[in-house]
Image (tube, rainbow, N blue to C red):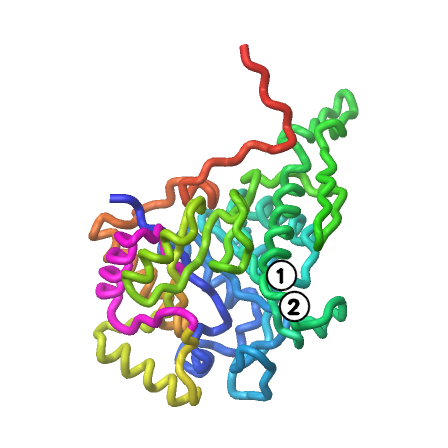
Amino acid sequence: MSELHLAVALDGAGWHPAAWREPGARPAELFTARHWAGLVTEAEAGLLDFVTFEDALALQSSSATAPDARTDQVRGRLDAVLTAARVAPLTRHIGLVPSVTATHTEPFHVSRAIATLDYVSRGRAGLRVQTSSLPYEAAHFGRRTFPVPVGEPAGEAADHVEVVRRLWDSWEDDAEIRDVATGRFLDRDRLHPIDFTGPHFSVRGPSITPRPPQGQPLVTASAGAVAPRPGSVDLVYVTPRDGDEARAAASSVPGTAHVFGDLTVFLEEDGPAAAARRERLDAVAGQPAPADAAVFTGTPEALAGLLLDWREAGLTGFRLRPAVLARDLPLITRRLVPELQRRGAFRTAYGAPTLRGLLGLERPANRYAAPAATA
């Protein structure tokens, strides 16, 4: 039986709009390092593959198309990349995957930031690429007008990823000599301009950050966020509602190493208690949990069965969205994971030092390095 992979999506106090009002949520700590460190260490205690950090370039909104004026829901975020870098030294094994909006962010900056995170975490960095077509986000930058042509954000994101990946390779692995005796720190012949020119970016390179420990940190994106190109994205997130949709989603992204299903979860000791909590939270918020992905309401044991069924449909892993982090995350790490272990479907210890290693991915060769001579 192949190993199931699990990630958790971290966002504020949880994915339900009323999560911050639940017992144990500690809303006064949402913008502290302690809050995020506690969440990530809990996820690592559950042997999860990685966590993602949500981010955006505008305040959260109850509307998908416009800002709102609500004051009864969490508003405001910390920078995802900086948060991941802050908690990296406090963890040893779990992958750290911050979200970045490619639409308004220069790939040169993103390449350096994720490479730095890979160094700080000793090979556990990833990147979740997202796009934006929201005029009120664009207004923060003043560089473009909206609406944009259909497909342009995804095409721009594909170019963005290509530039980032080339910059990661722009230093060969042995470019740093660091020889005190000869006074040579760097071999300039092993630094390469990437000379990328496209409709959205023109980047000379090379990077000013050496090649990351993983060579290429993990690149992830939701299905459709990045225009499909061979080798562009290592892991795709999909949002099936049932086994048939899981099967269709898994087969719709060929050439990708991993396809993870996104799932919002309300977990309790028994099904009626989980349903009651969900109904109570919906009533408090005046709206249901976000509906862009399937919502599971029930016990950790029942969730284990669902995940294994959907794995048989072709998904290689899941990114779970805890409705209330203070309640649902511990039930994932302390009840769901042991149940999956009991069924022989999940690791009992971390077995690789890097995020790529945890996901069974090799460290890629550098595209600019000369092939090694053969005897």
Q: Residue at position x 57%, y 46% from top? A: 118
Q: Residue at x 68, y 30 (%)?
A: 175
Taking the spot 58% from the left edge, 85% from the top edge, the residue there is: 68
Query: Residue 91, image x and y in percent?
Result: 48, 52
Compared with 3, 61 (above or below) is below
Instruction: For the N terminus, give its image quadrant.
Output: top left
Q: Is 310 included in the stretch rendered in magenta?
A: yes
Find residue 158 and report its horizontal and vertical position in percent: 59, 52
Q: Residues within 10 Å of mark 1 (few under 14, many from 20)?
A: some
Q: Kindly identify which residue carries mark 1.
A: 152
Task: Report if residue 367 is visible in the image.
Answer: yes
Where is 285 relative to 315, above or below? below
Q: Assess whether mark 1 and mark 2 are in contact (beta carbons under 8 angstroms).
A: yes
State how far apart marks 2 and 1 are (Cα): 7 Å
Which amino acid type corresponds to the residue marked 1 in the rendered image? Glu
Query: Where in the figure is residue 358, as x and y percent of width and height?
Result: 41, 44
Number of other residues with Cα within 10 Å of mark 2, as a class: few under 14, some 14 to 19, many 20 or more: few
Q: Secondary structure at mark 2?
A: loop
Across and down, in percent, residue 155 comes to: 61, 56
Left or right: 287 as drawn, with respect to 333: right
User: Which residue lies under the disc numbered 2?
Assistant: 148
142 above or below 216? below
Magenta residue span: 292-319
Instruction: Identify residue type, mark 2.
Output: Val
Please say if 210 is above or below 100.
Answer: above
Residue at screen point 46% across, 80% down: 17
User: Which residue ends up furthest to the right in the rendered image?
Assistant: 183
Question: In which quadrant of the rendered image does the C terminus lie?
Answer: top right
